[in-house]
Amino acid sequence: MTVQIDRQAPAPGEAAIIKSAKRDLFIAGQWVPATGGKVFDVFDPATELAFTQVADASVADGRRALDAAVSAQASFAATTPRFRADVLRRVVTILRERMETNIRILSMEAGKPLAEARAEINSGIDFIEHFAEEAVRTEGNYQVNPVSGGRMIVVKQPIGPSILITPWNFPFSQAARKLAPAIAAGCTVVVKPAKETPLILLAFAEAFQDAGLPDGVINVVTTSDSNGVMEPLIRSGDARKLSFTGSTPVGVKLLEQAAEQVLSASMELGGNAPFIVFEDADLQIAIDALMINKMWNTGQTCTSANRIYVHASLIDTFQEMLVSRMSSYVQGRGQDEGVNLGPLINARQLASVESMVQDAVAKGAKVVLGGERVDRPGFFYKPTVLRDVSADAELNREEIFGPVAPLISFETEEEVVAKANDTHYGLVSYLFTEDLRRAIRVSESLETGNVGLNRGTVAYAAAPFGGVKKSGLGREGAKEGLDEFLETKFIALQL
């Protein structure tokens, strides 16, 4: 059965960008079509209409990409750290030159307002610059063997060909978190972007090509069949590293596949972030932090506040402030002037958010603001505030990934810490207090890999980021992010 796909005519200024954008696979330094010329549609989530097509890779295409990475590994590992650092710096220069074009690409496929698209690309550039600097600081060790009197030498070497699977919510910055340390370490890669947002990753690969990265070091496979194409590569034994950002259920499946060949795996998975406002908190600081945290990318972030715990003495005032701020957002297509809140990524995500809100209401929650779809084309959901959300509501157990703020009252520190830790996830938590002793005490008690103390953001290139429990394995950013792509070798030398 043939399905008719409605298509949108490009807006003024967008047609040339779409026409010039790379849409083929990037394998062994060449832009090539998928086997049989297969393509899949890329949709604008603000209109629900397809605006272009990209190559739809087959299993054989994926295999060619991994073969190219394997073939290039030895020669790339032999390059100097300075060479790799210089390539990364040239990529930064190229990306800054192409900033306006890439902002438009990212906004079109991900639905982001232009200001958010710009911020994401700048964030990714920050990671590239950071790892350009870290590339020349890969350290080993040399010491006298305390037992034999010989010498003990420790060296760090590239882990080898790596498979990188990136998400749709931050398709550029998340790719930069993985690509930059891999290149800095001397690893070749096969990158598979999400099918919703392939164009910005292809533009990223083009920047590496133009910066003089050797052929075969970066290979990009776009596909509508992620598992079908990537599982054989993971199970092949030819790759030595798997790095994934996405949901916990998918991450678990990938870990099962990686286990067959004992691949090193880095997983940045789902979250269920508590956002705790104590009775002595500065409410203006807390509200400002919550708006950045909760509404960025329409709430589609793994670090987004999922459970908002507010002390009983403050919750009514906090609710008034929150409703006032969330009512001020202008929803629409990201490229339109004045818009500061875009759509959700697709129909499935819209239905998920809608279902979670309905479940919470059925279990006693009160809708203070929003609570429904926007009556217009696109995957839009109204900014929503819920009050008195029960502990058994689905959105208390799983990440919402939408512009929904559930308010939950608490009385004591012990109570709220216990509630915050009552989850299988442990990516990030936030707390707001002016009491230094409490700040340290609670920060150390929260079972998460990251804590935002009187602030709503925790992800920086110079800081290690990652989760505990079912929120992941390994770290991205900082020196730890580079170590994810390095193996430690010990050489025992007898004189």
Image (spheres, rainbow, N blue to C red):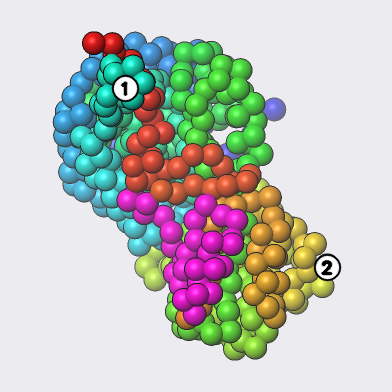
User: Which numbered disc covers residue 145?
Assistant: 1
Does dot 1 land on a helix, a strand or a loop? loop
Quadrant where the N terminus sits is top right
Q: Say above or below: 407 vs 168.
A: below
Residue position marked by numbered label 2 in the rendering: 363
Give the camera-side residue of 85 and 441.
Answer: 441
| Residue 383 seen in the figure | no
At 62% across and 70% down in the image, what residue appears?
A: 308
Instruction: Please report the residue visible at 54 percent of the width from the left and 39 percent of the height from the top.
Output: 473
User: Magenta includes 468?
Assistant: no
Q: Which residues are magenta?
A: 435-463
Task: Provide residue 397's location: percent of width, then percent of height.
Answer: 71, 56
Residue 120 horizontal side relative to residue 139, left or right: right
**Of 44 and 213, which appears nearest the observer?**
213
Residue found 64% across the figure and 75% down from its top: 413
Residue 274, quarter of picture: bottom right
Q: Along the polypeptide, which appears first: circle 2 or circle 1? A: 1
| Above or below, comparing residue 156 to residue 232 in the picture | below
Q: Is residue 461 magenta?
A: yes
